[in-house]
Amino acid sequence: MAIPEIRVEELKKRLDAGENLFLLDVREESEYEISNIGGKLIPLPELAKHLSELDVHREIVTICKMGPRGAKAVQLLHNAGFEHVWNLAGGIRAWSDRVDHSVPKY
């Protein structure tokens, strides 16, 4: 399965338009404390235990540092029956580079 992705510019446009997207940050807590864009933190190793906390009908965007963990999260969610899930292409680093330079890079 090809992992569906959303570019940071598209995500920014959709958030600015008030779309009800659920941002799921799958990094570790220490990374989230350095920089985040307000998503719900559920580290990837813990995600399978927290699926019942997520709305299967809501659009979900997974966020990690650069994309690989987010892609794994998309695959896990898709396998669990979630259909409207995208990985943030380039992760939070791309967000910092191309959308909001105030978001710290690490």
Image (tube, grey):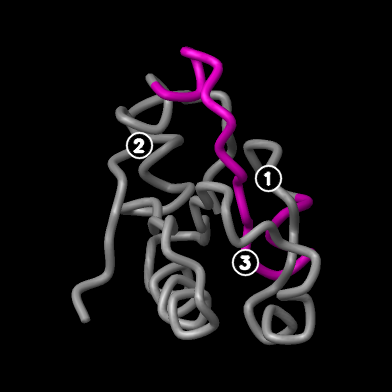
Q: Residue at 70% of width from left, 38% of height from top? A: 38
Sequence-first tag of 1 and 2: 2
Q: CA distance from mark 1 to mark 3?
A: 9 Å
**Residue 48 drawn at (x, y percent):** 68, 85
Q: Is residue 34 left or right of residue 63?
A: right
Q: Residue at x 38, y 64 (%)?
A: 67
Instruction: Report which quarter residue 14 is drawn in.
Output: top left
Query: In what element is the residue under mark 3?
Result: loop
- Residue 70, compared with residue 106, is above or below; it is below
Q: Is residue 29 magenta?
A: yes
Question: Residue 39, which numbered label?
Answer: 1
Give the class, few, some or many, for how many residues have Cα within 10 Å of label 2's Cα (few <14, many ≥20): many
Q: Amino acid at mark 1?
A: Gly
Q: Is residue 48 above or below residue 35?
A: below
Name the residue furthest left.
2
Task: Check the picture and name the quadrant holding the C terminus.
Answer: bottom right
Residue 30 located left or right of residue 73? right
Above or below — where is 14 with respect to 74? above
> Contact (CB < 8 A) between labels 1 and 2?
no
Q: What span is in magenta?
A: 14-33
Residue 26 disc label: 3
Estimate how packed mark 1 is, as few (under 14), some (14 to 19) or many (20 or more) residues with alpha carbons within 10 Å.
Answer: some
Locate residue 29, reporting x and y percent: 78, 65
Circle 3: residue type: Val
